[in-house]
Amino acid sequence: MAFDVTIQPSGQHLEVEDDETVLEAALRQGFAFPYGCRNGACGSCKGRVLSGEVDHGPAKPPGITEAELADGMALFCQAVPSDDLEIEVREIGAARDIVVKTLPCRVARLAPLADDIMELRLQLPANERLQFLAGQYIDILLKGGERRSYSLANAPHDDEHLVLHIRHQPGGRFSGMVFGELQPKSLLRIEGPLGSFFVAEESPRPRLFVGGGTGFGPLKGMLDHLAHQGLDRPHHLFWGARDAAGIYAPEWLQAMHAEHGEHFRFTPVLSGTMAEVVAGFPAVRGFPHQAVLDACPDLAAHDVYMAGPPAMIETATAAFLAAGLPEDQLYYDSFAPAVS
């Protein structure tokens, strides 16, 4: 039995098959819903059920709270309709013309960025290009049906290679390959582009970028894309790391500041070993969300883009909304761990 789902505020309809999630049905039928991890961890696909009932499965997904469930919210990547629905969700027009592809690729280059971070460059076949939006991610398809998600760290105009920043995770299946057996010309398969984390270019507001660890990768892609178009308003990047070695792109930061200093600021935020200056920029001690609040008390005047570990995203989201940031001016990609 199929269920009819009415999407507000557009009033459009989609049909959801038995045991299909709302997000699966939406993507299958060409609707551009916000989403990230697709396993219930990141919360990017959150929306409101205006009428009808959904089932999230036997256990509450980590990306939604009991209070939000009681308030009628749902995670559409996990929500299976129990009857016809009316839902409210932010549709994303920019992604509608992007085609998701499954493609072979070769490793073009492996370059260490830090002791535990590798830049992996992937080369597509000569007759293929991957159209994507800055900030989106791809899945590496592994044997046995497993997949690993990594954000693209390059901008769409600079697409000779697909560039990934990969942290070595102890026991990690793919990151272990990257730091071990992968060599130039090794063959891989990818699927993408995926995700709804990209720049709302129609907004006239200044932009704040908040990254933790390799969450810098998609933010770099966004800033490269915006710089290519010409920065026309303030852009402030806050990058959190344990120590100065975690700020692993000093040349890029210095080049961005030299070329776009009128509209680009950078603040390194260190939670562990403190240094007064990192890559030539004054550093602050603490956590990224607090550095943002200290520097920008009027968050309502900005758009905020965040990428990094779930704990950072959850803490910053709560702090920013409490400080007056409208929810529709907050965009994020939570780097939830792989679920095998």
Image (spheres, rainbow, N blue to C red):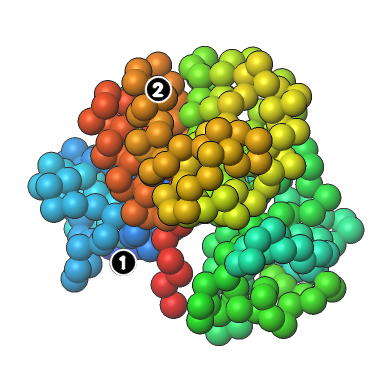
Graded by Cα atoms within 10 Å as few (under 14), some (14 to 19) or many (20 or more), the crowding at tag 1 reads few
Instruction: Point out the tag, 1 or 2, that comes first from the N-terminus.
Output: 1
In the displayed structure image, the side of residue 202 where residue 310 appears, left or right:
left
**Quick one: SS at disc 2?**
loop
Q: What residue lies at 84% left-to-right and 73% top-to-bottom?
A: 185
Please name whichever residue, 11 or 149, is drawn nearer the observer in this view of the structure.
Answer: 149
Position of 19 relative to 100 (above/below): below
State which mark lies toward you, 1 or 2.
Answer: 2
Q: What residue lies at 32% left-to-right and 26% top-to-bottom?
A: 325
Quadrant in which residue 292 is drawn: top left
**Quick one: SS at disc 1?**
loop
- Name the quarter where the C terminus is drawn: bottom left
The spot of residue 145 in percent (x, y) is: 54, 79
The spot of residue 330 in percent (x, y) is: 39, 33
Position of 115 relative to 48 (above/below): below
Q: CA distance from mark 1 to mark 2?
A: 45 Å
In the displayed structure image, the side of residue 143 where residue 208 appears, left or right:
left
Quadrant in which residue 58 is drawn: bottom left
Q: Amino acid at mark 1?
A: Asp
Position of 223 relative to 54 (above/below): above
Which disc, if any, is residue 296?
2
Q: What residue lies at 31% left-to-right and 48% top-to-bottom?
A: 314
Q: What residue is shown with label 1?
A: 19
Please name whichever residue, 291 or 224, is drawn nearer the observer in this view of the structure.
Answer: 291
Q: Amino acid at mark 2?
A: Cys
Position of 85 relative to 261 (above/below): below
